[in-house]
Image (spheres, rainbow, N blue to C red):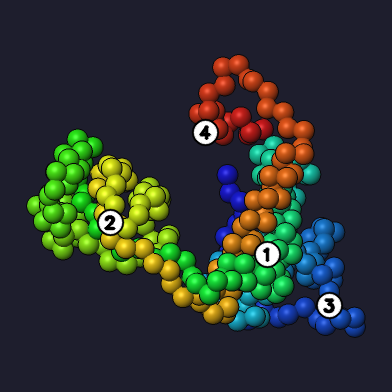
């Protein structure tokens, strides 16, 4: 099921083709640049065709790209006219999906732009860093083992008075083991979520219970927690904008879906694997 043709051989010789003759009025989106059996192709069609090209094609000289795109659209038009106006069902569905996605993206873009203006960014910065401090920074160590049973054994030895660094060198399977399990200083977002959540619950000097992550089972020692200095506004502008945009989109999506009348009927004997069956959408 092909979304569109790739560039045809005309790309190689497009530089030698002549541009259309200039017209008296300034070209605009609805300016017709070609017609195929009476079906018009406009500059607007060409602009959107270029927009959807891979970046390497966009680097081509303007004249080469202009002629290549126009050739492609002419060829595609001539080919699709062979259907005599009959649109295959899978194409109708694909177009509906594409239209839905593009319109939704347009709304999202508007929501994000409205949420991340200069005033909103300054307000977010003031709220987040009003104390003059940045986020939390942690100095922790861990002992990584393969099973929960091994982690419980390690915890029991620590509770009985074993030295954490010594035990890490003996038992930890992680790369920090030879250093006594020391992970150095790190901020939020640097560790996998399960590990980070466990660290956030600890006080300085405390040792966690077994924590499972994709790497195995951890026993974590939080050596120290401290505040970093607040960054300058320009340093975190992009980060703040991302946070504001994400929250605005999530809030708007939740608001709209909560207000919408959504029905999801139960369909008897529906196998999710049905989505693999392309024969369902072929005419």
Q: Residue at x 27, y 42 (%)?
A: 210
Between marks 1 and 3, how big is the CA–CA gap?
A: 17 Å
* Residue 155 visible: yes
Q: Quadrant of the C terminus?
A: top right
**Between discs 2 and 3, the one toward the N terminus:** 3
**Between discs 1 and 2, the one toward the N terminus:** 1
Q: Are marks 4 and 2 in contact (CB under 8 Å)?
A: no
Residue assigned mark 2 = 205
Badge 3: how crowded within 10 Å, few (<14), some, or many (20+)? Answer: few
Whole-percent x, y for residue 85 in the image: 79, 44
Q: Which mark is residue 49?
A: 1
Q: From this viewpoint, which residue is outermost toward the top?
A: 268
Looking at this view, is 118 or 14 the one in front? Answer: 118
**Between discs 1 and 4, the one toward the N terminus:** 1
Give the image quarter of residue 36: bottom right
Between marks 4 and 2, how big is the CA–CA gap?
A: 54 Å
Residue assigned mark 3 = 27
Residue assigned mark 4 = 276
Rendered view: 247 above or below 66: above
Give the image quarter of residue 279: top right
Whole-percent x, y for residue 118 in the image: 70, 74
Whole-percent x, y for residue 261 in the image: 77, 33
Whole-percent x, y for residue 183 in the image: 26, 62
Between marks 3 and 4, how big is the CA–CA gap?
A: 45 Å
Badge 2: how crowded within 10 Å, few (<14), some, or many (20+)? Answer: few
Give the image quarter of residue 42: bottom right
| 82 left or right, relative to 246 | right
Rendered view: 257 above or below 265: below
């Amino acid at each position: 099921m092909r979304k569109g043709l790739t560039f045809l051989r005309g790309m190689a010789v497009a530089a030698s083709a002549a541009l259309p003759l200039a017209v008296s009025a300034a070209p605009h989106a609805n300016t017709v640049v070609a017609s195929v059996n009476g079906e018009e192709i406009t500059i607007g069609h060409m602009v959107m065709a270029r927009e959807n090209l891979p970046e390497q094609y966009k680097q081509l000289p303007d004249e080469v790209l202009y002629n290549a795109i126009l050739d492609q659209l002419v060829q595609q038009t001539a080919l699709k006219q062979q259907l005599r106006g009959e649109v295959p069902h899978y194409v109708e569905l694909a177009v509906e999906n594409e239209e839905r996605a593009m319109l939704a993206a347009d709304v999202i873009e508007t929501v994000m732009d409205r949420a991340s203006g200069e005033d909103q960014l300054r307000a977010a910065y003031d709220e987040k860093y009003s104390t003059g401090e940045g986020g939390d920074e942690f100095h922790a160590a861990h002992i990584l083992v393969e099973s929960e049973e091994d982690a419980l054994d390690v915890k029991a030895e620590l509770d009985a008075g074993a030295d954490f660094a010594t035990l890490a060198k003996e038992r930890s399977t992680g790369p920090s083991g030879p250093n006594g399990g020391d992970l150095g200083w790190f901020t939020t977002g640097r560790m996998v979520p399960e590990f980070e959540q466990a660290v956030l619950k600890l006080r300085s000097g405390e040792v966690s219970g077994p924590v499972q992550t994709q790497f195995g089972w951890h026993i974590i020692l939080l050596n120290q927690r401290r505040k970093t200095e607040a960054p300058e506004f320009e340093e975190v502008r992009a980060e703040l904008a991302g946070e504001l945009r994400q929250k605005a989109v999530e809030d708007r999506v939740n608001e709209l879906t909560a207000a919408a009348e959504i029905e999801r009927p139960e369909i008897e004997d529906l196998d999710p694997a049905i989505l693999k069956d392309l024969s369902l959408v072929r005419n």
